[in-house]
Amino acid sequence: MAISAESTQTRILVSLSGEGSPFILERLYYKSETWLVWTESGFVIPEESTEPLAVTGDFVDSFDLHDGLYQYRIHSAAIENPEFSDYQFTCWTKFGVPDAIGYSFKNYKVPEGEWGTIVTPDDCRYTFLWGTDFKATNGSMFTDEQIQWFIDAATKEMERQLYITIVKHRIKSELTIESQNLKKGVDYDDEETPYDFTYRKIQRYGMIQTKQRPILNVSRCTLINKQEPDVNLLPSVVPDKKNGVLKFLKRPYKPSDTWMGISESISRYGQETFNNHLFYAVDYDAGFETSD
C-alpha cells in the first residue's frame, strides 16, 4: 500500500493504492500532536467508542481545514491495534494561502515597523531540507516558532564566531537611554557604556573602534564632559562602516611640554588619567543592510 497527498486552494487530494483494500485514514495538523481518525462525522480524536470509517480509494479532504501543514497516514483496516511499522505516511502538505513564504520563494516582505529575519521557517522547511519532513525524534512536527528560535540562535552563534553583527541592531549609549528614558525593544536593541577618552590615542589616530560592526549609520557622537558643556562631534565624524571605525576630521591639539608637565604633576596617577572624566556617547545602527 502507498499514500500521497496534494493540496489545492480548497481541499487536499489524498491518493491511496493497495488493490482496493480498505484502509483506516488518519490526519495530523502541524500545530497539534494528536492524530485524528476519519469517521462518519469527519476527522475526530480517537476514543474507545470511536468507529473509524474505512476508505478504499482516493480521498478528498475538505473537512475543517486551516492554513498550515497536514500529514496523513493509513494502516490496513484488518489491523485493530496497529504499531508504528504498520503505517504508511505522506510528507507534510501545505494547505491554504499564502503559500510558503521566504526568500527562496521571492515573496518575503519585511513587516512594517520591524527589521525582518535572515531566513524564514518555510525556507528551512521546503528549500534547505528539500521537502524532507522537519520532525523531532518523537515524530512531532517543528512549528514555525521553533524553527525561528533555531534561526535566531544560529545567527547569534555566527555573529559571535565572526565577531560581526549580522541582524540589524539599534545601539544606544547608556547616557542617551537615561536622558531620554528610552525603552529596550521599542527605542533600541542593545545598550553600550560610553567609550573612554584617551587623549594620546585620539590625538595620534583620531578614531574610535565601535563594539559592533559593520556600521549602518551614526546618530550621535558626543564628547561628554562632566565639568563643561557637551561637545557634538557628529559633524566631524567620518565612519568606516565596514570595519566599525569612527574617524575624526578634527583632532585635539597636541599639548605642549609645559601642559604635559603640569598635568603630570597635579594628577595622582600621571597625565594619562588627567582627562579620565571625558567620555564618548555614541548611538549607531549596526548590521548588514541586506539582513532583511
Image (cartoon, rainbow, N blue to C red):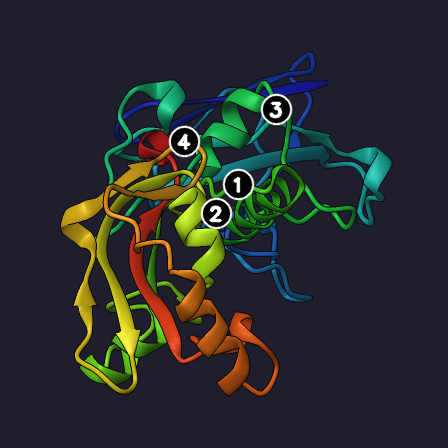
- Foreground pick, 32 / 85: 32
The alpha-carbon separation of the residues under discs 3 and 4 comes to: 33 Å
Q: Residue at x 44, y 71 (%)?
A: 193
Q: Nearer the viewer, residue 24 or 12?
A: 12
Please identify, in this view, whether the residue under mark 3 or under mark 1 is nearer the observer: 1
Viewed as shown, does residue 79 lie left or right of 136? right
Please identify the residue farthest to the front as the structure is shown: 258
Q: Which residue is mark 2?
A: 144
For label 1, the SS is: loop
- Compared to 255, does 275 lie above or below? below
* Three-letter amino acid code of the residue under disc 4: Lys
Q: Give the foreground label among 3 and 4.
A: 4
| Rendered position, 71 above or below 178 | above
- Three-letter code for the amino acid on which mark 1 is drawn: Ile
- Label 4 vs label 1, nearer the camera: 4
Looking at the image, tell me whether mark 3 or mark 2 is earlier in sequence order: 3
Residue 243 visible, this angle: yes
Could one spot residue 112 in this view of the protein?
Answer: no
Mark number for residue 164?
A: 1
Q: Position of residue 85 (x, y in %)?
A: 85, 35
The kind of residue on which mark 3 rests is Leu
Mark closest to the chain's N terminus, 4 or 2: 2
Q: Quarter of the image for the N terminus: give it.
A: top right
Residue at (35% x, 41% y) in the render = 215
Q: Position of residue 113 (x, y in %)?
A: 18, 53
> Closer to the N terminus: mark 3 or mark 1?
3
Q: In whole angstroms, how far apart are the C-alphas of marks 4 and 2? A: 33 Å
Q: Closer to the N terminus: mark 1 or mark 2?
A: 2
